[in-house]
Image (tube, rainbow, N blue to C red):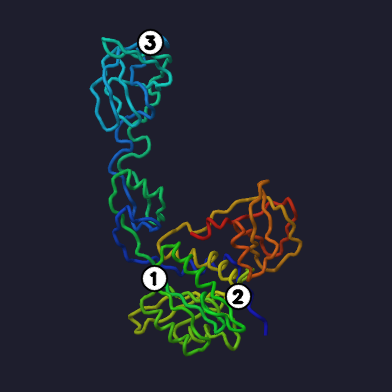
Amino acid sequence: MNKPPMLTVQQALDFLLAAARPLPDVENVDTLHANNRVLAADQVSTLDVPPMDNTSMDGYAVRAADCASGQATLPVSQRIPAGHVGAPLQPGTAARIFTGAMIPAGADAVVMQEMTALQKDEHGERVTIRHQPQSGEWIRRAGEDIHSGSVILPAGTRLRAQEMGLAASVGLATLPVVRRPRVAVFFTGDELAMPGESLKPGAIYNSNRFTLRALLENLGCEIADFGIVPDSLQATRATLRRAAQDSDLIITSGGVSVGEEDHIKPAVDAEGRLDMWQIAVKPGKPLAFGEVRRGKPADGVAWFLGLPGNPVSSLVTFMLFVRPFILRLQGVEKVAPHAYTMRADFDWPRADRRNEFLRASLNEAGGLDLFPNQGSGVLTSTVQGDGLVDNPAGKTIARGDMVRFLPFTSLLY
């Protein structure tokens, strides 16, 4: 019997993204607490930014025509700090002005203080302008950044520090955001132990629990952690039922192969529906996708994604498939990670029939060095590396070749 062909990475990703329906629930949050949330609606500015013409320098507001000679001495008529409104500037005078302050009516240029000299006497202050300013010099015009009525942040925007600052700059005190995805996780394997416990013969510490939880936190998820589940069909089914009750998505690690102690497939088949995929990806390959019933038909289903148990395989399949799926649940359209074309400072002479994702690090020469051990259990490669080289199926790499590089900074958040 012929095995079905393996899915390409893109085929599997397209299938997942087509299935991911954005969550319908919206909540309003204080802009100060909106970091890492996803906007549920376009945000429109109700004002110009900046709201008035202002100076981008400390110096003197002048009429450019009064300084046409390039060496003019003018009386200082007023002092205008930021947040204060000055009087109209009279011809033949200058106003001391500070960064961010509103340009007084009548002034059309600012001369930076480094190009001036101030004198004081019994008649007051006079400033010598040692520069011939052009009209508009060092003036930030009202609305040059944002015009009132414009969309500053579209729906589906994932809010970072800069988006929060932009929202605040137009006075948005609260923002409508998609509620956080509720994700349940559990980890199968009688061999798993938790740090702090003594290791029995044949046991290993459950690193995937820590990795996957951190990845989910980075994506703004609410996490229900059901811990380590014994290798039994009954225990796996019972945990799936509990996990499905209040979750949008269930993620497991381990047990997605077809061995006698791999119970994920029969358990999910019994509690819902499952597709077992063989993906042409290395590390990775096995990935399970389906749904688990919540109880009555009216209660709906929770999505299910089963990841391999090897630590690097679990991490890579999460970055390639789970991350974009969760982002799409939150309404994010652009879920592809940033990729860069970089020079390989290594040789990779063996071509694989699968799409390989090789751990690599940036070097001081502006190229990429390959981590020497590419095994699927070598977590040090993900700590010491800076990202993944996306090497297509059937391709070798020679030193000096240009390759596609996915930095971890665009895959983990």
Q: Earlier in the sequence, mark 1 or mark 2?
A: 1
Q: Which residue is mark 1?
A: 182
Question: Relative to the observer, which residue lies in front, 47 or 362?
Answer: 362
- 91 shown above or below 354: above
The mark lying in front, picked from 1 and 3, is: 3
For image coordinates 57% across by 87% down, the residue present is 261
**Amino acid type, callout 1:** Arg
For image coordinates 61% across by 73% down, the residue present is 285
In this image, 125 relative to 306: left or right? left
- Picture quadrant of residue 303: bottom left
Q: CA distance from mark 1 to mark 3?
A: 68 Å
Q: Residues within 10 Å of mark 1 (few under 14, many from 20)?
A: some
Q: Earlier in the sequence, mark 1 or mark 3?
A: 3
Q: Which residue is mark 3?
A: 72
Secondary structure type for disc 1: strand
**Amino acid type, callout 3:** Ala
Residue 409's mark? Answer: none
Q: Which residue is mark 2?
A: 278
For image coordinates 57% across by 82% down, the residue present is 191
In this image, 10 relative to 165: left or right? right
The mark lying in front, picked from 1 and 2, is: 1
- 177 shown above or below 71: below
